[in-house]
Image: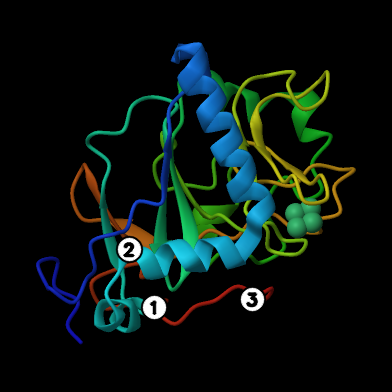
């Protein structure tokens, strides 16, 4: 398999879900997306697998099991989350706004984190992990969308104070109540033990990111976090 940026072996992603900032939506659309996100969160992997089969032909699906995917972020709006598929796992791509980044360094949040510096190894390299942002580019956050407790898909809950009175915004797993910030770092009081894994990726261009390896040589292509 080649790792050329134009290779046809690199799959275009299936966009599973696209959620814009809830505050900007009309009420009917807002309600629909909240309920859709709830279904995804509580439905866990079984529902996810069904959607995958509907969206891919069998040959492509098999090929996609290990292939990197290229994601174009040029149409993402601030605060918008999309969910794509890589190695049969859901992956978030979130365009973080400035206020979201600010929450990540707030002492009141940091003191609630189980592993604020992501020292427990759930990402391929320290380049992704040890900062507050857990990303090569702070504005674009990429993570595998599976709770580290029992692998449900957490809901995107950006609005502050909506999960707890002190909720800064982030991801909430409806299955058993695990809470994560906008860098998918797990908060104290969650049954989930670890921060959510960051997949290997690198930027091909300013607007296109390749998920599944860290460079053209295919480094970390076979990496999986300990919890899988
Ligand atoms: S699977 Fe997420 S809290 Fe249990």
- For the point 45% across and 26% down, which residue is it? 79
Q: Which one is closest to the eye, mark 3 or mark 1?
A: 3
Residue sitting farthest toward the left: 6
The colour scheme is: rainbow
Disc 2 residue crowd, few under 14, some 14–19, many 20+, Cα 10 Å: few
- The secondary element bearing badge 3 is classed as loop
Question: Which label is found at residue 55?
Answer: 2
- Asked if the residues shown at circle 3 and circle 1 are in contact, with their CB atoms under 8 angstroms apart, the answer is no
Question: Mark 1 — residue?
Answer: 221
Q: Earlier in the sequence, mark 3 or mark 1?
A: 1
Q: Earlier in the sequence, mark 1 or mark 2?
A: 2
Q: Nearer the viewer, residue 75 or 225?
A: 75
Q: Nearer the viewer, residue 131 or 97?
A: 97
- For the point 52% across and 21% down, which residue is it? 30
Question: Mark 3 — residue?
Answer: 228
Q: Is residue 163 left or right of residue 36?
A: right
Question: Which label is found at residue 103?
Answer: none
């Amino acid at each position: 398999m080649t790792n050329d940026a134009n290779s046809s072996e690199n799959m275009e992603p299936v966009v599973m879900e696209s959620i814009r900032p809830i505050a900007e939506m009309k009420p009917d659309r807002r309600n629909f997306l909240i309920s859709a996100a709830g279904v995804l969160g509580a439905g866990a992997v079984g529902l996810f697998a069904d959607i995958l089969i509907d969206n891919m032909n069998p040959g492509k699906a098999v090929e996609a099991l290990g292939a990197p995917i290229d994601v174009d972020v040029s149409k993402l709006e601030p605060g918008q989350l999309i969910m794509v598929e890589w190695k049969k796992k859901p992956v978030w791509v979130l365009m973080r706004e400035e206020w979201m980044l600010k929450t990540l360094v707030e002492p009141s949040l940091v003191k609630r984190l189980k592993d604020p510096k992501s020292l427990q190894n759930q990402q391929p390299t320290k380049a992704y992990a040890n900062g507050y942002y857990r990303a090569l580019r702070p504005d674009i956050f990429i993570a595998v969308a599976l709770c580290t407790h029992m692998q449900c898909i957490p809901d995107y809950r950006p609005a502050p104070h909506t999960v707890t009175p002190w909720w800064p915004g982030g991801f909430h797993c409806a299955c058993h109540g695990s809470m994560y910030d906008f860098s998918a770092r797990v908060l104290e009081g969650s049954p989930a033990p670890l921060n959510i894994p960051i997949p290997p990726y690198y930027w091909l261009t300013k607007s296109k990111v390749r998920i599944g390896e860290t460079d053209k040589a295919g480094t970390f292509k076979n990496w999986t976090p300990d919890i899988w």
